[in-house]
Amino acid sequence: MTKALIEIKHLVKKFGDNVVLNDISETINQGDVIVVIGASGGGKSTFLRSLNLLNQPTSGEIDFEGTDLTSLSEKQLDQVREKMGMVFQQFNLFPNMTVLENIKLAPMKVKQADDAAATAKAQALLKQVGLEEKADAYPSSLSGGQMQRVAIARALAMEPDVMLFDEPTSALDPEMVGEVLKVMQDLAKSGMTMIVVTHEMGFAREVADQVWFMDAGVIAEKGTPEEIFTAPKEARTKDFLSKVLAQ
């Protein structure tokens, strides 16, 4: 029995007169790996950031595990956000803390985890992302790919029910992209629910359960990777893919 984790109902987001998201209604089930693709300016990042209300919708509803997030107070919302891990383009690590301290911080402060438990969890996560030897290093000594892997480990330390990735490889040098995608691939295989905004078409093709193509504030087409990449129906999808796959 598939369980709906996030239900998006008539989501609209406007910045002034500019309609960035135009009446989107979709369901994300537990364990789904959804990859959102599309040209810049199509609304992908705004859509992703609306799922945990980092962007406040103009209208519509985001139901997460049966709760309408738009009806919550800021304090209640913060509690729900603990279950929604988020990884951004920029790594946002604390430069004055070691890698281990960066990962331990939220579980200790927010969940009141004790130091020993938080340390053990952080070490296990560092092993999971292939960086156990960097526990005592500071972010400034790491490559971009390593910093992003630490950022993923930090998000996982809160034991979220869903992971949101906002173009996690776009700030990386090309040779570092693979190491981050590998961690995400392993995460998907482990059953984590993931919504990923990315320009990495190979990742979308290999890892996604569904690919959603966004254009002009709507999900213009969605389907399995096979359907989207080999037999897209919409002219907009075909046009976009012909450009990105030719590169």
Image: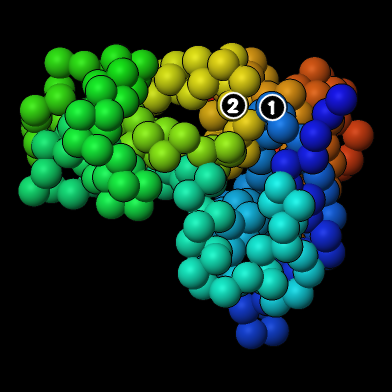
Residue at x-position 58% and y-position 21%: 188
Relative side of 45 to 223, left or right: left
| Residue 136 in the image, given as x and y percentages of width and height | 9, 28
| Residue 8 in the image, given as x and y percentages of width and height | 78, 55
State the residue lying farthest toward the bottom. 16
Residue that label 2 marks = 192
Which element type, helix, strand or loop, lies under badge 1? loop
| Residue 169 in the image, given as x and y percentages of width and height | 42, 35
Q: Nearer the viewer, residue 160 or 45?
A: 160
Residue at x-position 59% and y-position 26%: 192
Q: Nearer the viewer, residue 174 or 188?
A: 188
* Placement of 190 over or under 166, stated as above or below: above
Whether label 1 touches label 2, CB < 8 Å: yes
Q: Nearer the viewer, residue 231 or 154?
A: 154
Q: Nearer the viewer, residue 246 or 72?
A: 72
Amino acid type at mark 1: Gly
- Give the crowd class for mark 1: few <14, some 14-19, many >=20 residues within 10 Å: many
- Quadrant where the image shows the N terminus: top right
- Give the crowd class for mark 2: few <14, some 14-19, many >=20 residues within 10 Å: some
**Res. 60 visible in picture:** yes
Residue that label 1 marks = 31
